Amino acid sequence: MAIGILSVKLVLRYSHSLKDKRRVLNSLKDRVRQDFNVSFSEMEALDHRQYCILAAAMISNDKRHVNGSLSTLVNFIKTFPQVELIDYELELL
């Protein structure tokens, strides 16, 4: 069994309020849940309007599948227009 944990640090440059931030993040989370088979949640910086840390978790029988899926998720987040990916960390257990 393989468990993958992806942590991404994002900047929302055009977010002027927490309401703007929640709207963008809910859109991102909905797309991720629809397109990828992962659990996805905001973890830190909940009260900061332009910065957030999101985490995704995935469980599978194959480490290569987990690694590939989470790497594809990173590429998807890079192309999401309202957020800027600052850093990410991928951990396989």
Image: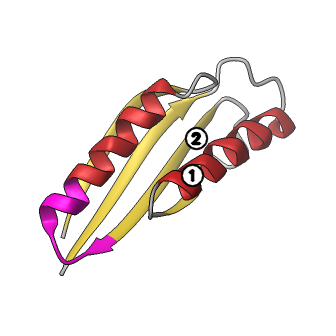
Q: Nearer the viewer, residue 60 or 4?
A: 60
Q: Amino acid at mark 1?
A: Glu
Q: Position of residue 28 (x, y in %)?
A: 62, 42
Q: Quadrant of the N terminus?
A: bottom left
**Label 2 to label 1, Cα distance in Å?**
6 Å
Q: Position of residue 25 (x, y in %)?
A: 67, 43
**Location of mark 2 (residue):** 52
Give me the disc on residue 44.
Answer: 1
The colour scheme of the drawn protein is: secondary structure
Q: Quadrant of the C terminus?
A: bottom left
Residue in the image at 15% along x and 70% along y: 62
Question: Looking at this rendering, what residue extends furthest in the bottom direction?
Answer: 1
Crowd rating for badge 2 (residues with CA inside 10 Å; few <14, some 14–19, many 20+): many
Q: Which residues are magenta?
A: 59-67
First in sequence, mark 2 or 1: give its number. 1
Residue in the image at 47% along x and 35% along y: 77
Q: Are marks 2 and 1 in contact (CB under 8 Å)?
A: yes
Q: Amino acid at mark 2?
A: Cys
Crowd rating for badge 1 (residues with CA inside 10 Å; few <14, some 14–19, many 20+): few
Q: Position of residue 30 (x, y in %)?
A: 65, 52
- Looking at the image, residue 59 lies above or below residue 63: below
Residue in the image at 45% along x and 56% along y: 36
Q: Could you tell whether 45 is left or right of 86 in the image?
A: right
Q: Secondary structure at mark 2?
A: strand
